[in-house]
Amino acid sequence: MGLDLPTGTDPLSIRRRVEAMEQVLERSFRIPGINYPVGLDSIIGLIPVVGDIVAAGMGAYIVWEAKNLGLPKWKLWRMGGNIAFDTAIGAVPLLGDVFDLAFRSNTRNLRIICKHLDRHHPAARTIEG
């Protein structure tokens, strides 16, 4: 049983891929005992420097998909700023790792994309359950 993501360039396919990437980066695991969701962004961010760079690269994929959707440049800059801020603070030992659990740049960027899609491509809306 594998993950079956759409490969199309239509807004709905892009939305599903971005939602899947955000899930992997921000909410793919739960911390036992407190049931708090974490993802690869927080986990690989524990590796000094390299982990933060890899996490930023994975987050940049979401911005690239947003560019493919035709989001305005100011929204792309805002999304890039979210990643840069997350990466910069995340690079601070210990404090950055704790911060990374609360500041979810990929979730913020997904919200920007979804808001754009809901307004400009209403057929790409998904029902959240």
Image: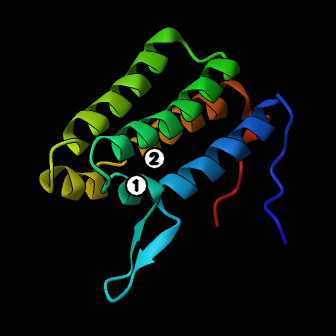
Where is mark 1, residue-wise? 44
Q: Is residue 38 above or below residue 94?
A: below
Given the image, on which type of amino acid does mark 1 rest?
A: Ile
Left or right? Give the position of 70 relative to 40: right
From the top left corner, tell me how far across and down residue 24 is, in percent: 56, 57
| Mark 2 crowdedness (10 Å alpha carbons): few <14, some 14-19, many ≥20 | many
Q: Label 2 to label 1, Cα distance in Å?
A: 17 Å
* Tag 2 secondary structure: helix
Residue at x 64%, y 67% (from the top left corner)? 129
| Residue 31 image point, x, y percent | 37, 78
Circle 1 — which element? helix
Q: Quadrant of residue 85?
A: top left
| The one of 53 and 15 positioned closer to us in this rendering | 53
- The label shown at residue 107 is 2
The 10 Å Cα crowd at callout 1, few under 14, some 14 to 19, many 20 or more, is: some
Q: Is residue 92 left or right of residue 69?
A: left
